[in-house]
Image (cartoon, helix red, strand yellow):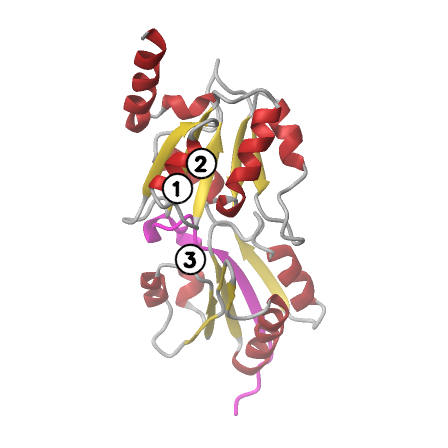
Amino acid sequence: MRTIINPKVTLVGAGPGDPELMTLKGILALNTADVVLYDALIDPVLLKHAPKSAIKIFVGKRVGKHSKPQEDTNQLCVNMAKKYGHVVRLKGGDPFVFGRGGEEIEYIEAFGISTSVIPGITSAVAVPAAAGIPVTKRGVSESFWVVTGTTTAGEISRDLALAAQSTATVVILMGTKKLGEIVETYQKAGKSHLPVAIIQSGTTQEEKITAGFIYDIEQKAQENKVEAPAVIILGEVVRESMRLAEVYREFVKMEIR
């Protein structure tokens, strides 16, 4: 058995879903991996960039279906690095945007193992953009919030109530199961007619977009059988997408009637 002199872990963001949206630097890291620990939202085609000899282990988590508790994954990074050398921890989106990347780095470095981070394109911006929705636009929205729909306590973030009071675009990740609470929060803020889009499996061939307003988005999501993973975008910028123009033209016609 070979002795590993310099074990290391590279935390790599795989991007929003489309494998072509992963960065070149991330691909180059995979090229030199001895072990790849990958998440549920990773397109399997990305694993082809790792050497054939590399060990590939699924450690993904989905809502209600945890393959590996986070603590087990942290320890696996350490064990594999010590045993094999270079571990690539491949995570969806960007590792530091609700990806628990900071926790993993902190844990691994406590064992004296060197780490590095290769950022990924976050779905919070890329998924709306791919659907033609700019999270900011001059004269429409001058800022945006990114909020988690599910905290470690399993609750919606308390920041959402603050965000709903602002004129900013709000992007919610991991929020499909909390859609009712999101709608209620915005209704309390007097924004029943605010445009909303829910983009399921954004940037992939399975992408599905549901668009409407706060007052009818729950019904539409139910009719379209919206499921995770999905990104929820709330704000006037949703109207800016040419792909959704018909939805909002129909609303104007109804208003005229």
Q: Earlier in the sequence, mark 2 or mark 3?
A: 3
For disc 1, the marked residue is 222
Between marks 1 and 3, how big is the CA–CA gap?
23 Å
Q: Nearer the viewer, residue 83 or 150?
A: 150
For the residues labelled 1 and 2, the Cα–Cα distance comes to 6 Å
Say if mark 1 contacts mark 2, CB within 8 Å.
Answer: yes
Disc 1 marks which amino acid?
Answer: Gln
User: 105 left or right of 178?
Assistant: right
Image height check: is 257 above or below 120? Answer: above
Residue holding disc 3:
41
The image position of residue 177, as x and y in percent, is 51, 47
- Discs 1/3, front: 1
Residue type marked 3? Leu
Q: Quadrant of residue 55?
A: bottom left
Q: Residue furthest bottom?
A: 1
**Residue 76 drawn above or below residue 234:** below
- Judged from the image, the secondary structure of the residue bearing numbered disc 2 is helix
Up-down: is 188 above or below 100? above
Tell me which residue sits at (47%, 29%) in the image. 135
Q: Residue at x 43, y 50 (%)?
A: 229
Label 2 to label 3: alpha-carbon separation: 25 Å
Q: Which mark is residue 218?
A: 2
Of residue 197 and residue 177, the one placed in the foreground of this image is: 177
State the SS at label 1.
Answer: helix
Q: Amino acid at mark 2?
A: Glu
* Picture mark count: 3
Is residue 22 inside the magenta stretch? yes
Q: Looking at this view, is 103 or 116 the one in front?
A: 103
The residue shown at (62%, 29%) is 163
Looking at the rendering, the stretch of residues picked out in magenta corresponds to 1-25
